[in-house]
Image: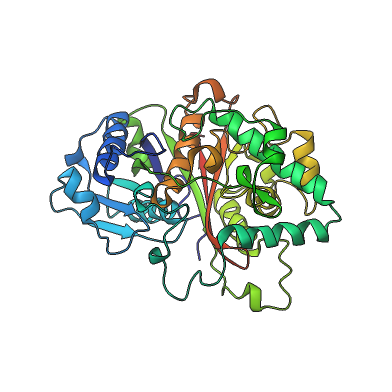
Amino acid sequence: MRVDAIKDKVAIIGMGCTKFGENWNMSADDMIVDAVDEAVKDAGIELKDINAAWVSTLGTMCSGYILSTPLKLEHIPITRVENLCASGMDALRNACFGIASGMYDIALVAGVEKLKDSGFGGLPEFFFHPAYGQGYTAPGRWALFANRYFETYGISPEDGKTALAKIAVKNHYNGTMSPKAHFQKEITLKQALNAPVIASPLGLFDCCPTTDGAAAAIICRADMASSFKDNFVNVKGFGLAVGPGLGKEDIDYRYDCLPETIIAGRQAYEAAGIKNPRDEISLAQVHDCFTIAELSEYEALGFCEPGQAVREVEEGTFTLEGKLPVNTDGGLKSFGHPIGATGIRMCNELYLQLSGMAGKRQIKNPRLGLAMAQGGHPGMLLPIVTILGSRD
C-alpha cells in the first residue's frame, strides 16, 4: 500500500456550510443548495464545471439523487457514502481518490442530515442495521469507557469529571466565535459540573446535541488549483482503520484506549510525512460526540502520552491559546452532529484556519491541520483521520 499516494495531489478550493441547529424552516434539499452554493462561489466555479460528486448521509433508502435533484445536476456520476459518523469525511476521502487517480479534474463533496424532524433526542434506531447498536446507548458506552479510563490511570472521579467539564467549557467558548454553530453561548465550569446526569460520569454538557446541517467542498487537481485562487488548501493524507468490532467480547480489551484511532492516526501521519504530531500539527478538529471521546482522542492521536490527557487539560494545552488548539470552532459540542455533514464541517474549519479566514478564533500561522471523525463506540470504532495543509 502506498501511504503517500495522495499527498499534495488534491486541493480544496472552496467550502460552504449552513447554519447548524434546529433548522425547522429548511428541508435537506434547502440545506444542500445553500452549502453547495457557498462552496461553488468560494471556489469561483459553476456547477457545470463539476465532473463528479460524492454525497454523505446516514439516512436509509438514499442515493445520489439527494444531491442531483436539488442541484439539478445533469448526468454526472454521483456516489452516496455512508460510514456511520465518519460518513462526511469518508465522502471527502473517496472524492480525493477520484481526483488523484486522474479520472476527474473537479469534484463536489457534500453532506447533509435532517435530524430534528425525527422527534428523537438522539439518532433514530431505524438508521441502523439490526446487528448494530442493540442493547445499549451511546452515552452509556462512552460512560463505561470514562469510568474504566479513570480507574486505569488512577484519576479520581472528581478530577476526571472536572477535566471533562473543562473540555465542554472550552468548546462552548470557541463556539461563541462561530456564527454557524448550533450553540453560541458560554457555559461555566459550575454549570457543566452540576448539569443533569445522562450516564455517569457524563452530564448534559458532556454530550453533543441533535442537529440539522449541511456542508460542502469543491476539490480539484492540485496542479490546477492556483488557476482558481491563491489561498487553496492541499490534502496531505488520510487514515482509516476498521477493527473487527469485538471489543466487548475481547478479554484483552481494557476500555481505556482507542486502538482503531491510534492506527488511523499513524496511517495519516505516515501519508503526510509527520513524525511528531504534537509539534508539527497546528490545530485539530476531533470527534467530541462526548467530552470523554475528545479526552481519549488526545492520547490516541499522539497529542500527549497515555494517562496524561487530564493533566494537559488542566494546563490549557488544547485551548485557543494553547500549544495545540483543538476544536477551534466549538466542535460537535457547539455545532451538534448532523451525521453526513459533520466530517466535512470539521474540514471546513481547517480550511478557514489554514486560509486565514477564521475570524475571531483565528490562530497564528497554521501550517498543518488534523480532522478526525469516528463512528461507533469504544471497542467498535470506525475512525478517519484527515491531514490538510497550506501550500509548501
Residue in front for this viewpoint, 244 or 334: 334
Q: What number of labels is visible?
A: 0
- Percent across and percent down for residue 352 are 46, 30
Q: Is residue 280 above or below residue 136?
A: above
- Percent across and percent down for residue 319 are 67, 32
Residue in front for this viewpoint, 386 or 3: 386
Q: At 59% from the left edge and 33% from the top edge, which residue is drawn? A: 172
Residue in front for this viewpoint, 132 or 345: 132
For the rendered model, the colour scheme is rainbow
Q: At 56% from the left edge and 25% from the top edge, which residue is drawn? A: 361
Q: At 56% from the left edge and 63% from the top edge, which residue is drawn? A: 137
Name which quarter of the figure residue 254 lies in: bottom right
Q: Is residue 275 left or right of residue 85?
A: right
Q: Decide if residue 174 is in sight here.
A: yes
- Percent across and percent down for residue 124 are 41, 60
- Percent across and percent down for residue 360 are 54, 20
The residue furthest front is: 196
Q: Decide if residue 279 is in sight here.
A: no
Q: Is residue 289 left or right of residue 126?
A: right
Q: Is residue 313 left or right of residue 93?
A: right
Q: At 35% from the left edge and 28% from the top edge, which residue is drawn? A: 229
Q: Is residue 59 left or right of residue 154?
A: left
